[in-house]
Image (cartoon, rainbow, N blue to C red):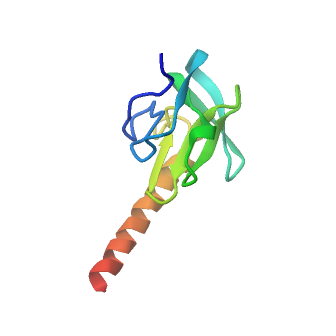
Amino acid sequence: RSNKSKKANLFPPPPPKIKTLPNSSTFKLKFGHHGGNHPIRHKPSGRVEISAQNHNFAVDPASLPANAEVTHINLNDGTCAGLVVKDKAALSIQYHPEASPGPHDADVCFEMFVEEMAKARAAKKDAVAA
């Protein structure tokens, strides 16, 4: 049986592959990630988030193309928990971010998403003005 998963959409989790990364691969976790209190490190800031998870596969970081960057690491086993595709304005996380009510550990994910929307809006305005 192949370790290649089917193409997946950006949200909701689990999104082991996003459409802009067709040659990336995933692998089956021995026990999967299930339940709450999974620590996730946001690599750019070093910040640790506590997450809820429910999946059995993870992205193989070695299979990612140069335009993709791992942004989140599961601290229990070191697997990829999130990534960005730099030239496609795409981001993906493989856990449940909590917006509200509840903890705000994953606020950085929402901040990244809002930042990408603002960049796209500015680019659109610049294109219209040109």
Residue 81 image point, x, y percent = 58, 36
- Examine the image and state in which quarter residue 64 appears: top right
Which residue is at 59% across, 41% downward? 105
- Examine the image and state in which quarter residue 70 appears: top right
Residue 74 image point, x, y percent = 65, 32
Residue 100 image point, x, y percent = 46, 39
Residue in front for this viewpoint, 97 or 102: 97
Which residue is at 67% across, 53% downward? 44
Residue lying farthest bottom? 130
Residue lying farthest left? 128
Residue 97 image point, x, y percent = 50, 37
Q: Is residue 120 above or below residue 29?
A: below
Q: Is residue 49 left or right of residue 8?
A: right
Q: Is residue 7 above or below residue 123?
A: above
Q: Is residue 17 left or right of residue 129?
A: right
Which residue is at 58% across, 53% downward? 66
